[in-house]
Image (cartoon, rainbow, N blue to C red):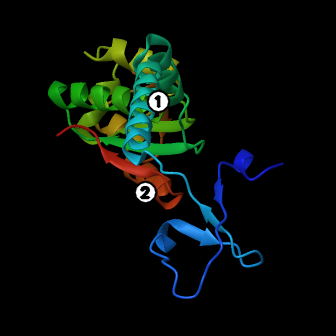
Amino acid sequence: MTRKEFGWAWRAEQQTPGGNDSKKDKSRRNSKSGALWEMPERDTMTERSLMRKLLLVVTLCGLLCWFHPAGLGQQAAAGAGAGSGKTHRVVFAVTSGEEADWNMTMGNLRNLIAGVKPDPYEIEVVAYGPGILMVKGDSTVAKEIAELQAQGVRFVACQNAMRARHLEVKDLLPGVTPVPAGIVEVVTKQEQGWVYIHGGR
């Protein structure tokens, strides 16, 4: 393979003492033969312009692929599949007898479940004190409680509060489980590492 095939312009000249070597900065001397190898002039401006255009085209293609409906679907799928894989254990304590607090608790429960998915969860709602009325058979949030029970939320009633209001298990909503003392149930869950949330305002 010749020197020209490597893109070099070869020029050999016999050097004499005191000869002019003004093109030294554009040439490389062959140490064996004394000949000069001249680099061809390069149009750097043209090369830079081409590189900018190429970079712009690649960037635009990437943006089009990202914002294309198929790309947006991939983003949504990636986000939907995200999760830590840990089991979230949360205990709610409802001590209020006011419907506004019950409704707020229902909303917080729904938001919690939606927020931790697809991770598994264990959620328990402890009703005690005046909050025992929330799990009575005639509760104004009976429908919401049934929907949450279908999603795995457990509702329990304090037996101390039940006795104070002369309530029996048959007076509670279906699926509500009595526990000896609501406050003890909450403390026990916290000691087991459950996160505590106060239901209502």
Residue 40: x percent and y percent? Answer: 54, 52
Which residue type carries mark 1? Val
Q: Is residue 37 above or below residue 44?
A: below
Question: Which mark, residue 58?
Answer: 1
Question: Which mark, residue 187?
Answer: 2
Which residue type carries mark 2? Val
Q: Give the structural element (helix, strand or loop) at label 2.
A: helix
Q: Left or right of 84: which side holds 161?
A: left
Residue 147: x percent and y percent? Answer: 43, 15
Residue at the bottom extreme of this rendering: 17
What residue is drawn where x is 36% and y is 26%?
A: 110
Quadrant housing residue 173: top left
Quadrant housing residue 48: top left
Closer to the chain start, of discs 2 and 1, is: 1
125 or 166, which is in the foreground? 125
What residue is drawn where x is 55% and y is 67%?
A: 27
Q: Left or right of 43: which side holds 19?
A: right
> Is residue 46 among what the camera can see?
yes
Q: Left or right of 185: which side holds 133?
A: left
Residue 200: x percent and y percent? Answer: 22, 37
What residue is drawn where x is 73% and y is 45%?
A: 5
Q: Left or right of 166: which side holds 30?
A: right
Q: Is residue 12 above or below residue 50?
A: below
Q: Nearer the viewer, mark 2 or mark 1?
A: 1
56 or 88, which is in the foreground? 56
Q: Is residue 120 above or below residue 67?
A: below
Quadrant housing residue 72: top left
> Is residue 170 among what the camera can see?
no
What residue is drawn where x is 70% and y is 73%?
A: 30
